[in-house]
């Protein structure tokens, strides 16, 4: 479940921001990397965040056990 609803791109965004701050990479390339990683982070936030409840119910992780 943590892989589905985990950090949602926090590490990727941090790495993309490090690339953006680099002087050794062309500006166009830095912009492309940041935009792609940002889109993926937003996409996973929208899709995974809105469907996490459904996945938890489907996997029956909310049912109470005797323990």
Image: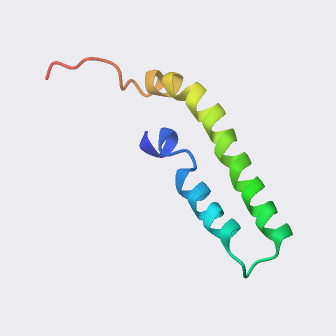
Q: Is residue 58 left or right of residue 24?
A: left
Q: Is residue 6 above or below residue 13?
A: above
Kindly give the residue lying farthest to the right in the view shown: 28
In the rendered view of the protein, which quadrant contains the C terminus?
top left
Q: Is residue 14 above or below residue 53?
A: below
Kindly give the residue lying farthest to the left in the view shown: 67
Please identify the quarter of the rendering in which residue 63 is found.
top left
Q: Is residue 54 above or below residue 28?
A: above
Applied colour scheme: rainbow
- Count of numbered labels shown in the rendering: 0
In the image shown, does 43 or 61 lie closer to the viewer? 43
Q: Residue at x 67, y 40 (%)?
A: 42
Residue 30: percent from left, percent from top: 77, 67
Residue 2: percent from left, percent from top: 43, 42
Kindly give the residue lying farthest to the bottom in the view shown: 24
In the rendered view of the protein, which quadrant contains the N terminus?
top left
In the image shown, does 50 or 20 lie closer to the viewer? 20
Q: Is residue 49 left or right of residue 36?
A: left
Q: Residue at x 67, y 69 (%)?
A: 21
Q: Residue at x 81, y 61 (%)?
A: 32
Residue 5: percent from left, percent from top: 49, 38
Q: Is residue 7 left or right of residue 31?
A: left
Please identify the quarter of the rendering in which residue 12 is found.
bottom right
Q: Residue at x 69, y 55 (%)?
A: 37
């Amino acid at each position: 479940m943590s892989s589905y609803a985990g950090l949602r791109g926090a590490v990727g965004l941090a790495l993309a921001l490090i690339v953006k701050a680099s002087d050794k990479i062309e500006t166009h390339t830095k912009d492309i990397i940041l935009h792609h990683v940002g889109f993926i982070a937003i996409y996973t936030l929208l899709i995974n965040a809105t469907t996490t409840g459904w996945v938890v119910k489907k996997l029956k992780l909310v049912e109470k056990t005797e323990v």
